[in-house]
Every structure is written in structure tokens, then in C-alpha cells.
Image (spheres, grey):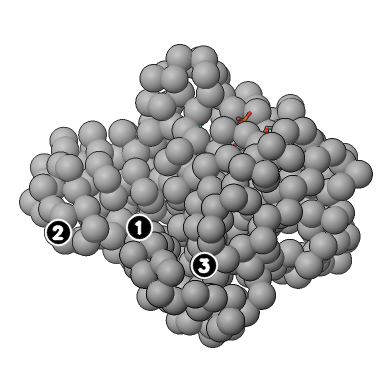
Amino acid sequence: SMLRTLARRTSTAGTRRGFASESAPDRKVAILGAAGGIGQPLSLLMKLNPLVSRLALYDIAGTPGVAADVSHINTRSEILGYAGEEQLGKALEGADVVIIPAGVPRKPGMTRDDLFNINAGIVKSLCTAIAKYCPHALVNVISNPVNSTVPIASEVFKKAGTYDEKRLFGVTTLDVVRAKTFYAGKAKVNVADVIVPVVGGHAGVTILPLFSQATPSANLSSEEIEALTKRTQDGGTEVVEAKAGKGSATLSMAYAGAIFADCLLEWDLNGVPGCLYSCHSYSQLVTEPAISLHPRLRFGKNGVEEVLGLGALSDYEKEGLEALKPELKSSIEKGIKFANA
Ligand code: NAD
Ligand code: LMR
């Protein structure tokens, strides 16, 4: 919807001057890690979102250049650039939505968990600042390993007394984006019509696309479903290998991060009820890792209104679900242990 809005806005530019700023509420979005591979295109996409009025771009370095560049784009939001830890508070103050793509990415041969030692500390310190400067913001965690960084965020917020499970999200939308693309190609259906729920976590087998529930339905063989499942689970690695040492997915991730944030802005903050959208919240996983695997959310006037069940699973998906639980559980526990150490 954001890109459709963008296309419309661009085509009518000049004829509807001041439209958004006069009618839409003030919304501040902060991006932490804004000068990075994801951060830069994500900053661009959020600058194109007419629901944003102020966009704070924060990184340890490099943000003045990114902010100056993006600020010349003639869309609604005011761009605020912040560099260095001493400016983090200012970047966060008054933020409605915080998106965190800060941290190191994978190189070929690494797992996402290999990033834990560096990224866990980054996420912990950024979330400590969020609890202090914008305790009510909707927080979107992109930094890997997501299966552990979201539990770290939740523990930090619990300690600070600001935790709200309806306001913390692990952004695994890229898995949904991939599942839709790969399914459309195989099923030969219009990709814009495709819905595929993806549940579980965000690493290898913990990513569980539910192709048995995909629509428009198609008569795919079990071999084809298995291949689609594996490709979705290994989508990140496919990009890491193709980039051959130059990092992981950045452009598709920026897209996924931007559409997820757009849903929060439109559905949650603006109270527009959203129909079913496959996104993930790990909050439920954090409280009861072994049993609560229902991270599909329905948005309504009051934010997250319903956590949807898994629906009917095929035997293949049931096996996948059992197989992912131990890894997901231990990644969650690793995050919790780190946060409380
Ligand atoms: P990158 O190295 O290009 O950029 C990371 C940025 O974070 C850099 O600009 C760096 O200066 C900044 N940074 C480091 N420490 C910081 C701190 N304390 N505060 C603020 N900024 C800080 O990496 P990238 O390709 O943009 O990837 C970023 C992260 O996103 C990685 O952990 C990667 O694994 C993850 N990722 C997640 C998904 C997902 O689906 N959730 C997809 C792709 C990448
Ligand atoms: C992805 O799925 O692309 C990200 O989690 C980055 C990675 O390391 O694979």
C-alpha cells in the first residue's frame, strides 16, 4: 500500500500541495543503524512514506551524510540526522516507531548465531536507551540473530518496567516476502495476489512457511513444496553467498522493513483495522517458548488485537514445527540469559 500511495502521490505532485502535512497526524520514526546497508535504503523508503512526519536517522557514524542526502527528497517528513552515542537520546525522544537494523551482517559460512557476540550487546544498549527516551514506541528489531535479539529486547524492557508485548516485534517479514515471491514463481500465479503465512523464528529450520495454506491455491507436488520450503529457509544464505563476503540482504530487507513499519503506522497508530497480515511478534515465544508458536497478528483499532493460531498444518509442516522448537527455544534462552547477565 505504501508504494501504491507513493505512486499516486508522485503522479499528483504539484496538484495536492501540502496534502499530507495538513491532514495526517504527527508521527516520528527513528532508524537506528541508518547509515548501514539496510539502514540507507530503509531511510529512503521511510522518507517516501507519507504517514511519517519526522524521520530520525541515527548511527554511530555516517548519518550526517545520509541525512543530508535523503533530506533533499521532496516528500512530507522532516529529516533529523544524529551521529554518536551522545545523540542517541535526541534521536529517540518522541519516537512513535523505532526500527533497529544496527549490527554486523553475515559472511559466507557463518550462521546468524555467529553474530550474537557483537549484535547482542548493540541491541541491549539501544533498547536500554529506548526504554529511557521513548518507552511507548513500537519497536521493530531487525538485527540478527533475531531469535535471540528480540528476547534480549523484551528482557531489557521488562527490567525497565516498560515492556508491552504488543509493542515489540521481531521483523521477519522478509521471510514472508520471499515465500510469496518463490510461491508465485512455482505456482504461476500473480505475485500481488499471494498470501503465505510464515511462522516460527528467523533462522534456517526455525522459519516455517505454511504453503499448505497459501492462496491462490495451486496443485504443487510434495517435492515442489519441500523445495519451496527449503528455499525460503535458506533465502538469507542464498543472498549471503551471492554477495560473497560483502554482507547479506539489504535491499529486500529494507523493503520488508518498510512495509512492516507502514502497517504499524497505518493499522496500529492510525487505527485503521488491518486484515490478516503475516508478520511476527516474538513476545509470545519469549514467555512460553515451547508451546506458544502463534506469531501471526491481526491489527485493529487497539493495535494488535488478536494473535492468530497456526491453522491446519500438513504432515510435512507438523514435522517442521516439531523440528524447529528445540533450536528456537535455545536461541530464546540464550538471549534471555545474556540480557540478565
Ligand atoms: P551493515 O554493517 O551494512 O550496517 C549496520 C550498521 O549498524 C552500520 O552502519 C553500523 O555503523 C551500525 N551500528 C553498529 N553498531 C551500532 C550502534 N551501537 N548503534 C547504531 N548503529 C550501529 O549491516 P546490514 O547489512 O545493514 O545488516 C544489519 C543487521 O541486520 C545485521 O545484523 C543483519 O544480520 C541483519 N539482517 C536482518 C534481516 C532480517 O530479516 N531480520 C535481514 C537482513 C539483515
Ligand atoms: C536474511 O534472512 O536475509 C537475514 O537474516 C540476513 C542473513 O544473515 O541471512
Residue picked out by circle 3:
50
Query: Label 3: how many residues lie within 10 Å, few (<14), some (14-19) or many (20+)?
Result: many
Residue 224 screen position, x and y as percent = 16, 38
- Front-most of 79 and 42? 79
Regarding residue 339, the answer to whether it shows in the image is no
Residue 268, picture quadrant: bottom right
Mark 2 is surrounded, within 10 Å at the Cα level, by few (under 14), some (14 to 19) or many (20 or more) other residues, namely few
Given residues 325 and 49, the one toward you in this image is: 49
Three-letter code, disc 1:
Pro
Q: Dot 2 corresponds to which residue?
A: 217
Query: Amino acid under label 3?
Result: Pro
Q: Which amino acid is tagged 2? A: Ser
* 206 is higher (above) or lower (below) than 168: above
Residue at 53% over, 58% down = 74
Instruction: Indicate if the residue with disc 2 has its beta carbon within 8 Å of ligand 2.
Output: no
Mark 3, ligand 1, within 8 Å: the answer is no
* Label 3 SS: loop
Q: Is residue 112 visible?
A: yes
The residue under label 1 is: 197
Left or right placement of residue 276 versus residue 137 in this view: left
Q: Position of residue 293 (x, y in %)?
A: 50, 58
Quadrant of ligand 1 in image = top right
Q: Secondary structure at mark 1?
A: loop
Q: CA distance from mark 2 to mark 3?
A: 34 Å
The answer to which of marks 3 and 1 sits earlier in the sequence is 3
The CA span between labels 3 and 1 is: 28 Å
Q: Residue at x 74, y 48 (%)?
A: 81
- Residue extending furthest toward the right: 86
Q: Considering the image in quadrants, where does the C terminus appear?
A: top right
